[in-house]
Amino acid sequence: MIPQGHFARSLRLRRLHHHTPSGLMVTPLDHSISDGPVVPRNSSIDTLAQQLAAAGVDAIVVHKGSLRHIRPERLAGMSLIVHLNASTGQAPDPDAKYLVTEVEEALRLGADAVSVHVNLGSDDERRQIADLGRVSDACDRWNLPLMAMVYPRGPRIHEPHHPELVAHAVTIAADLGADLVKTVFPGSLPDLMALTAACPVPVLLAGGPPRATEEGLLGFVSEAVAGGALGVAMGRSIFQSADPQRTAARVARLVHRLPDAPGGASAETVEGADTVGHVTRGHQHDGQQTVLA
């Protein structure tokens, strides 16, 4: 299928997939502004980036200043997504996100894509949606892929995983021009399948807080894939684990539809493989096929 839209944007979208076009694993490391350091003790963000690349992660999400502390060679086989807005957990309204850099600056830094966070239902929702629209316009001018992170989150949101709210969140992302949308699990596998079938752009599920066990984490990833999600955008469950590289490798193999390595050990992902292994392949709607052609 011939990709829709500008060739350069379609090319950059395809380049986000370093292992297989049928799955995408993103590890956000942008929590550093909202929550504090993301780097494991006695390590560095450069070492963490090296481990994630070796594990088969397709892309990391970082703020602009983090790039001063990551060697360029870490990103030879892993894409760079620069996060454009932020807030801190210490603010009067932690859900109020505001832009801290621009698309042009991200391009200057070598970004393969940019991301913007919107909290649907927050007191500051108006500003965040307007910012997403402006960023989308700039991405159109520069043909740069845009990932929108849209969550139902705010004082009037009592059921953040309600399927109707999650469907509203992904619709905002698609209607304002995002190429990918990261959002929360909508409560059940049938609801996820309905969400991904209806959404015109590929969906990545947010990893959320770390699970009690690795088996629970991998079960969540398997369900995401079975429900038609393109993959996951998983941060805390990776960098807060006892062995980030091993955990990331196991998640990446599920997302890339590869059988797990013997004993769950970290192993390199086979380039270009498109094997299901023991994971049920999720359905891919036309929006995913078009974007990834």
Image (spheres, helix red, strand yellow):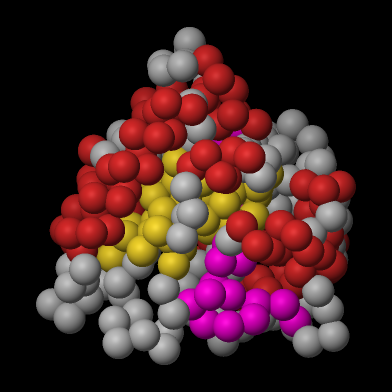
Report if residue 39 lies within the magenta region: yes
Q: Residue furthest left?
A: 156
Residue closest to the eye, 81 or 289: 81
Which range of residues does the magenta coloring cover?
21-40
Q: Is residue 67 visible?
A: yes
| Residue at the image point whose x is 53% and y is 50% from the top | 231
Image coordinates for residue 58, horizontal then vertical, percent: 67, 47
Image coordinates for residue 200, horizontal then vertical, percent: 31, 34
Looking at the rendered structure, the number of numbered marks drawn on it comes to 0
| Residue at the image point whose x is 19% and y is 53% from the top | 168
- Left/right placement of residue 60 relative to residue 285 reads right
Residue closest to the eye, 110 or 263: 110
Report if residue 226 lies within the magenta region: no
Q: Is residue 199 visible?
A: no
Image coordinates for residue 35, horizontal then vertical, percent: 52, 82
Q: Is residue 286 above or below residue 149?
A: above
Image coordinates for residue 271, horizontal then vertical, percent: 79, 36
Residue 32 location, quadrant: bottom right
| Residue at the image point whose x is 17% and y is 59% from the top | 126
- Left/right placement of residue 12 relative to residue 115 reads right
Residue closest to the eye, 146 or 197: 146
Q: Is residue 237 above or below residue 125?
A: below
| Residue at the image point whose x is 71% and y is 38% from the top | 18
Q: Residue furthest top?
A: 2
Residue closest to the eye, 265 or 238: 238
